Amino acid sequence: MKSVFQLKQIQYKDILQVEHMDIPLHRITCIVGESGSGKTTLLKMLNALISPTQGEIYFQEERIQDMDSVQLRRKVIMLGQNPVVFPSTIRDNFHAALGFSERALLPDQKLEEYLRMVHLNKSLDQTVESLSGGERQRLALARVFALDPEVLLLDEPSSALDEETEIFIIEETVNYAKKFNKTVIMVTHSKLIAEIYGENIIKISKGRYVREEGQ
Ligand SMILES: Nc1ncnc2c1ncn2[C@@H]1O[C@H](COP(=O)(O)OP(=O)(O)OP(=O)(O)O)[C@@H](O)[C@H]1O
């Protein structure tokens, strides 16, 4: 199976250590492990938000330390635990994200399509202040879809969100990935979620990569 990421002899401070890891292309990978084990740290290294203290990470055979991180982050996009939304309209939120990643702005019709994909039935003129926490999370997901990533990194939504929203976000992400042939790498504390959605499971324990399960 083709890899999208390869990690070799990775060390990040005294927080995370990975001897070797392959993450498959066009598959759903779940990263599981107890709180504080280093899951988010691993995810952040994959789009160069942090750099390993030692070792090498390859993205499709290119060393990410040699790549321009802005270019990398156009292809590998992370939806974090607490995504930032701008205090403006839904439309402005899409446009700001497209602008930051130096992409052409999209017509309203296209933006509305992305809102439908996350079942957010709101007008583009509505301000984000009027959205609930779960709706903001869905807007943030629609915004990631609009950026058309090759790899979507999904960190577990913050515990402030209800479980229903969390499952919804995961399901929509998986549907999107299957429809458009994308790679998804998601962090979850739930073994059950990993078993349901993960085609590949990576287990981190106390800062060490202990297991990978193919399904
Ligand atoms: N920049 C940093 N400097 C020092 N310690 C850090 C830094 N970032 C994370 N840590 C620590 O490294 C460990 C791993 O953190 P990480 O966020 O990767 O865990 P996690 O598995 O994602 O946890 P959770 O499931 O609770 O979100 C934790 O003990 C955390 O406190």
Image (spheres, grey):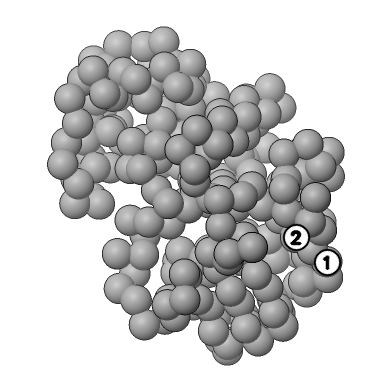
How far from the left and from the top, in percent, is residue 41? 61, 66
The answer to which image quadrant residue 142 occupies is top left
| Rendered position, 31 above or below 14 | above
Which residue is painted at 73% across and 45% down in the image?
A: 198
| CB within 8 Å, label 1 to label 2 | yes
Secondary structure state at the residue bearing disc 2: strand
Distance from disc 1 to disc 2, alpha carbons, whole Å, reads 6 Å
- At label 1, the amino acid type is Arg
On the question of residue 35 being in view, the answer is: no
Closer to the camera in the image, 20 or 127 = 20
Which residue is painted at 58% across and 87% down in the image?
A: 55
Quick check: is the Cβ at mark 2 less than 8 Å away from ligand 1? Answer: no
Q: Is the residue marked by circle 2 packed among few (<14), some (14-19), or many (20+) residues within 10 Å? A: many
On the question of residue 145 being in view, the answer is: yes
Location of the N terminus (image quadrant)? bottom right
Closer to the camera in the image, 111 or 91 = 111
Horizontally, is 158 left or right of 176 in the view?
A: right
| Rendered position, 215 above or below 8 | above
User: Residue under circle 1?
Assistant: 211
How far from the left and from the top, in percent, is residue 57? 53, 78
How far from the left and from the top, in percent, is residue 141? 46, 34
User: Residue under circle 2?
Assistant: 202
Closer to the camera in the image, 203 or 85 = 203
- At label 2, the amino acid type is Ile
Closer to the camera in the image, 203 or 82 = 203
Which residue is painted at 33% across and 36% down in the image?
A: 146
How far from the left and from the top, in percent, is residue 78? 47, 51
Secondary structure state at the residue bearing disc 1: strand
Horizontally, is 93 left or right of 103 in the view?
A: right
Q: Which sits earlier in the primary sequence, circle 1 or circle 2?
A: 2
Which residue is painted at 36% across and 82% down in the image?
A: 66
The answer to which image quadrant residue 63 occupies is bottom left
